[in-house]
Amino acid sequence: MSEAAIEKEVPMVHLTINNIPVEVPKGTKIMQAALKLGIDIPHLCYHEDQKIKAHCRLCSVEVVGKRRLLAACSTECWEGMEVHTDTQIVRDTQVSILQLMLANHNKDCLSCPRNQNCDLQRLCSRFNILKSPLPSVVKITPRIETNPSIVRDPSKCIRCGRCIRACKDVQGIAALTYAHRSSDIVVTTAYNKPMEATDCILCGQCSLVCPTGAIVEKDDTQKVLDALQNPKKHVIVQVAPAVRVSIGDAFGLEPGAISTGQMVTALKLLGFDKVFDTNFGADLTIMEESAEFVQRLTKGGVLPMMTSCSPGWVNYMEKHYGDLRDHLSSAKSPMSMFGAIAKTYYPEHAGVDVHDIVTVAIMPCTAKKFEAARPEMGRDGMRDVDVVLTTRELIKLIKYVGLEFQQLPESDFDSPLGFGTGAGAIFGASGGVMEAALRTAYEKVTGKTLEKLDFDDVRGFEGIKETTVDLGGKTVRIAVAHTLRNARLIMEQIKQGTCKYDFIEIMACPGGCIGGGGQPIGTTNAVRKKRMAALYQIDKSLPLRKSHENPEIITLYKDFLGEPLSEKAHELLHTTYHKVDRPYEF
Amino acid sequence: MNNKVSFLTQNFGKYDTSSIDSYMKIGGFSALRKAVKMEGEDIATLIAENKVRGRGGAEYDMGRKWSQARKVPGNNHIIICNADEGETTTFKDRELIKNDPFNLIEAMIIAAYVMRATDGYIYMRAEYACFRPLLLNAIRQAHKYGFLGKNILGIEGFDYEIHLYSGAGAYVCGEGTALIRSIEGKAGRPRMKPPFVKVSGAFARPTCLQNVESLSLVPHLLLDDEKVYQSYGVGDSVGTKMISVGGNVRHPGAFEIPFGTTVRDIIYGLAGGIQGDRKIRLIQFGGASGKIATDDILDTPYTYQDLRAHGVMVGSGALCVVDERTSVIDFLRINQDFFSEESCGQCTPCREGNLHIKIILDKIKAGTATKEDIAVMEKIARVMSMSSLCGLGETAQNTLRSAIEVFPEVFAVGGAEA
């Protein structure tokens, strides 16, 4: 389309902001028009991926001819509009609103998990709020730390509603909502129950959008620091595929930058005895999961089969569609498969007493903390994965030991659990598990070499992606969905008996793990897309891109597991699910 | 000195409010029969010619509102009658519902005809539950007589139902978007605009929201061939107005007055003067979100323009008369308690601002307020008014801000008792 044609389709409007003329397409909001001029209008409830709320009123600006200030986040520009963002009343409003928020905020910033990474703190610094003329009215209540994943601190909440929107609009769950009114209004759960006792599936998307420290991941960094200091312990770490394309965000790298080598070096400098790769676990998952799918398809099992790597999704299935749980693949997630191997095969192989091994997993996910704590994920009273850290916690550890991440040299993962193929790498993106499974399933079923490895139909940010694949004369219908709002659409089809798919991949978080609830603050959809592209770039650059060609996997089966779906594989690599009764069913 | 008129209230006491036959005997539904022979736009024009302003408090040109609403595309518009009447000292709609329920139903059917509405909602405040049977009976009988339902008055496609919905007691549900959310079964909290209610209101359908009094006027205007309505009033304030007078007056009540009646005639005539012949401390116009004046307003004619010139507004039509026994600061604290309770809590300025202004008012009362406290209070009040999400936050400090102008001595540091 020519530029002229584009202009014709979206008419432009002309306005001035602080007397500077600017031209924007009709429909543009004042906030974005100002950004075009390099003016950052302060905001807190506004989030680029969310519906506009216009609650915090911090972005109020003056528009000539209007009696009152208008919210820059919600007001569309019009022809001839004259906006002022720096008049006395605008400044009074910005400062007063921040002072009002501060008066009702627990200001223990120095010991806050979001210290130096907090929107409220940044804005108070920007507006040089040195002292507030208002008395403190905050009600300090204990932090709510009742589950392994998410911690809430209502005394930090500024009632912006971002978490509510994330839970409701992204996940379709609405575990969080406003309750009460006036200065008593709070963000809470139904009947004020702990989150894990509600519809919440611990995905952590709320913690990703919270501008303050009101909802954060459960911090387990001290456990890791203690283990690393214990000379008796052999501490090994695995890192999820999505972490290597997100961790750089916190150290000044461009979103989507691939920093695998620096990340491995950082983990070694932190003192881990071995640095392994969850991509290895992902390849292992593909071996089992693709075999399971082929078995269900050819020998008659429950279809559609649904992937089970995403712990938020598994929680969702158990809580919301417990009666349909047989659709889930019994294969454990890459993290948990890795953990099982690390506590069985690895000690023999490395000559270490299993009781001395501490397994740490770096995950882009808060729900993984819950998964690792499941009783199914361990044996003899031992957990397979001892500690799960989110990407955010790893960032804290790297800062703690004072590493200049950008300047670190690159190094490689250790062996024998440190080799991953391109198929394992793309697990971090929505559609990646499916693509990896199809690469293996195709070759296993047909015995032929797959010519084109890229399954483009299941890539990208579309909510539900579909394709069909010919598996040795049988047409297999595939769907890939991310976010539970989309998952629900498919689950309802299954419930109604109208689902036409054979194999479905579900990821709880937008974009898959690269958009997980444990990723760095500032993970927006634009950033997610860059990380996605980075994972496919990693895949493309690797010599081995099919899980069954992973030499360490081949060795593992030869020396230890036998065949996929063998008795040993079942014992270690597969799990069961349970229907979870919700405390309130209406 | 008796300025009481009965144009809007002409049916009061004339018929049995539980009987549609009785209503029809006094000419009930003849306005509707006349309306359906007219063009909808002409009815909007008729309202505009009579210079009717919305009686809910915003004082918006009603004829223009109807004309705009009917131009919104769609054939499933919604008419909402706002009977939330939550402003303090305001009880004029209550009289209209109680004494002339069929007129209100008729008005809502006429509105449906003009706006091509298929559903009408009466959103009535919880405290008026006693009128539910009255209105439900009126709706049922109107249905039975073919004034509601399908093909009303035999007009093909004129289908319309009226639903009665009771609020749960929140003042903020008088605000249009909060009211609509409440009708939709959601928590009654306002939302940002756009989308505007007239385009996407209740259940995302085009919606026209009108106050009880505004609607009730329409059947009378339609039958007013002699232009009696226009014979009342002064200048741009045409016709009559329902007001409600409360506080320390001898005879609190709702009255219909011609615009232009002086405040003195209202308070000392219709309402019988002040109890114990005490002096007036202040008069609050338009309820808790209204502004206040001293007794120097007594000879001002009650019109939109004259009240504005005196720093107050018609608003909801309420006059709360406070005598000298109550200090200004005590009155303000009571008024503030109301808003500290009734803010919905979504937007920062209103949620937190009401809380802090209450604290500072208490300090003024205790004599511990500093100059800085007063300055902070004024600033917060202004920020609330300028930047709150909805009309509640915008107007919550009207009383305080006008008090600062009218009674500056109260806010001089150390001068707590006025």
Image (cartoon, rainbow, N blue to C red):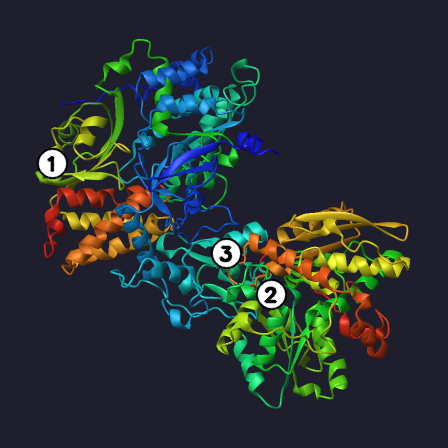
Tell me if mark 3 has few (under 14), some (14-19) or many (20+) residues whose alpha carbon lies within 10 angstroms of its own.
many
Residue A264, by quadrant, is bottom right
Query: Disc 3 or disc 2, which is closer to the eye?
Result: 2
Q: Are marks 3 and 1 on the same chain?
A: no
User: Which label was assigned to residue A364?
Assistant: 2
The x and y percentages for residue A294 are 85, 59
* B125 vs B67, nearest the viewer: B67
- Answer whether residue A369 is visible to the viewer in this image: yes
Type of amino acid under label 1 = Asp
The reply to whether dot 1 and dot 2 touch (C-beta < 8 Å) is: no
Quadrant containing the N terminus of chain B in the rendered view: top left
- The local secondary structure at tag 1 comes to helix
When the figure is inspected, residue B47 is found, relative to residue A224, above or below; the finding is above
**Disc 1 crowd, CA 10 A, few/some/many (<14, 14-19, 20+):** some
Task: State the image coordinates of residue B234 (x, y, percent, origin top left).
Answer: 20, 19
C-alpha span from label 3 to label 2: 18 Å
Residue matched to label 3? A163
Residue A184 rendering spot, x and y as whole percentages: 37, 56
Q: Compared with residue A307, is residue A218 higher up or lower down, i.e. above or below?
A: below
Residue with the mark numbered 1: B295
Give the vertical position of A478 relative to B301 (above or below): below
Q: Are discs 3 and 2 less than 8 Å apart at CB?
A: no
**Residue at (48% x, 37% y) in the render:** A27
**Tag shown at residue B147:** none
Which amino acid is tagged 2?
Answer: Pro
Q: Gap between marks 1 and 2, in whole Å?
A: 68 Å
